[in-house]
Amino acid sequence: MAKAELYKITINEGKVMLRIPEQLVGAETANMDDIQAELHLRNLNYVPEQLLEIYNRTSGEFDYLSDVETNDYTLQIELSEDQSRAYVNIIPPSEEGDPLTVELIIAALEGKNIFQGISSKNIKNIIADKIFYEPALVASGKTVVHGKNGYPELLFIPEKSRPALGTAVKLEEVPVLQKVEEGQELVRLMSATMGENGYSITGKMITAKSGKQYRIRPGRNTRYNPEGTHIIATKSGVVCLNSDSISVEKIKVVDKVDASTGHLRFDGIVKIRGNVADRCSVEAVRIDIGGSVGKARLRSLGEIRVAHGIKGAIVQCGRSLHTSDMTDTQANVGEHLLVDDFVLNSKVFCGSTLQVTAPYGYVYGGVLQAGNLILLPNVGLPGTKDTKSDEVSEENSEPHTILEVGITTNNRKQFNELQKLTDTSLQSLQDNLTEIDTILEQLEDGGWNEEKIETLSEFETEAEKNVISAFTNLRKRESHIEIKDLNRISNGGVVFITGKILTGTVINVRRSRFNVPATATDKAYSFDENGIKFNSCKELLKNYQQYFFRMPA
């Protein structure tokens, strides 16, 4: 066996340390003569009785043997994490021999390939003030300055209630419906900064990260100011946020929707103080309902809020849906679904996240699908007794509840279709511009006539439509990209159950199926190469909590 495996001598902070591993019966042991010979060769003094004690103890740990007697200064060079700064930690000898000099410290720095940014002034101060046993700055490169992200100042919100300047703002969590006047400034946009590159003390460039621009655009009845620094209302109304844009909409307030009012369709925001009765429908840019919804139809381009629950309705929502509870409901939600209490026997699909927020809340029956994440307190009716999978009768062999995450084939087709529509609109726009250029050349050569001017006007109108179409489809595609990015981060999606999940529940992740064999608690179901796996919900949820939607006040 090699000597290095039988004993080890090291010097740490001026102390001689000796380690002798525990000796196994029948195994080769460290030789005292070898240890003493190495100590002599390295000119290390020691007390023989101390060496014998360590040799007999064989603790397997490094034991103190003696102090190093030297007249030289020990110089320890330390670099910052980005190598933009160098520090020296000086350990003086017990008895000083040659004095400590600037040249000695510089030589130690050059031994670490540090040739630039050395401060002779700092080194002289360290020697003069005898700064020992603590790192002191002796060389500096240029510290990198990373760019700052852009951010909005939301001027339509009262100043006391606005998010702090510079903080990240999620538009979907900002309270809206504030009244604004024509010409009023709604948002002030602060641009991102580029950042400044730095360099290390070894001459290596340190690249700065550029800040990200904050994305918010003018929607209906809003525009940029000429400088592009503010978004301004072009009409009076109430503020409405939709995905990444801000608009100003008209608002219609009604007491209820029933047989006496008929179907309600409005190009703006609808606020209903009471209930929506059976066999009625409501269509608007945004819908706020202070009561409940029966067997009706709701369709909104943006958000829908229902204060007292939905029972038997068909709901189509372009952005997010918030309700206290759902029973026998079919809902298609573009991004987020937020339910306070329970979802019962419903068929629900949402593009990104689905969650039930109350600690006592639950889901039971039906199919709940989300593009990325599902967060539920309980699966199963309250008070349901635990059963084992082999005790489920044939009559009840159908799953009670199906939970599914992952972008569907339909979503992927829609994403690809949006790309095709955008490309088609841009190609048609290019053709329009070519035709317009041709007509303009003909008008310059042959003079103006009514027929050519009318043709030119038609092409301009068509070109404008193609611009709007391409712009609209690109914005829709951007929201799909965000959903796809989160799907990639979560490896196809995760189902979180913070409380109890009932036997017989089916979990589908990336089209892999898992039947819950026995009632369990605190589980997170996700996908890996071997299929669906489950972990502790509380630990994994910390990584994804930021992606769940929080309803603004």
Image: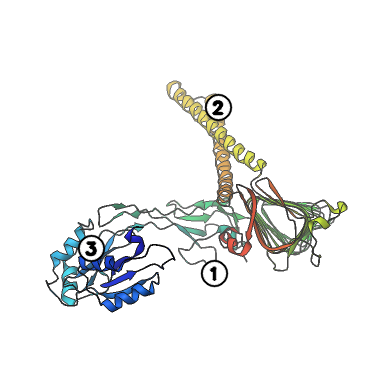
- Closer to the chain start, of discs 2 and 3, is 3
Q: Nearer the viewer, residue 425 or 228?
A: 425
- Indicate the amino acid at tag 1: Ser
**Position of the N terminus by quadrant:** bottom left
Q: Is mark 2 on a helix, strand or loop?
A: helix
Label 2 belongs to which residue? 455
Tag 2 near tag 1, CB within 8 Å: no
Q: Residue at x 29, y 59 (%)?
A: 84
Label 1 belongs to which residue? 161
Could one spot residue 316 in this view of the protein?
no
Q: Nearer the viewer, residue 273 or 378?
A: 378
Question: Residue 420's x, y, as percent?
Answer: 58, 34
Is 375 on the left or on the right of 82, as rendered? right
Q: Which one is closest to the eye, mark 2 or mark 3?
A: 3
**Does 490 appear above or below 158?**
above
- Closer to the chain start, of discs 2 and 1, is 1
Q: Which residue is drawn at 19% across and 58% down?
A: 110
Is 31 on the left or on the right of 504, as rendered? left
Label 3 belongs to which residue? 139
- Indicate the amino acid at tag 3: Ala
Q: Which residue is drawn at 43% across and 21% down?
A: 445
Tag 2 near tag 3, CB within 8 Å: no
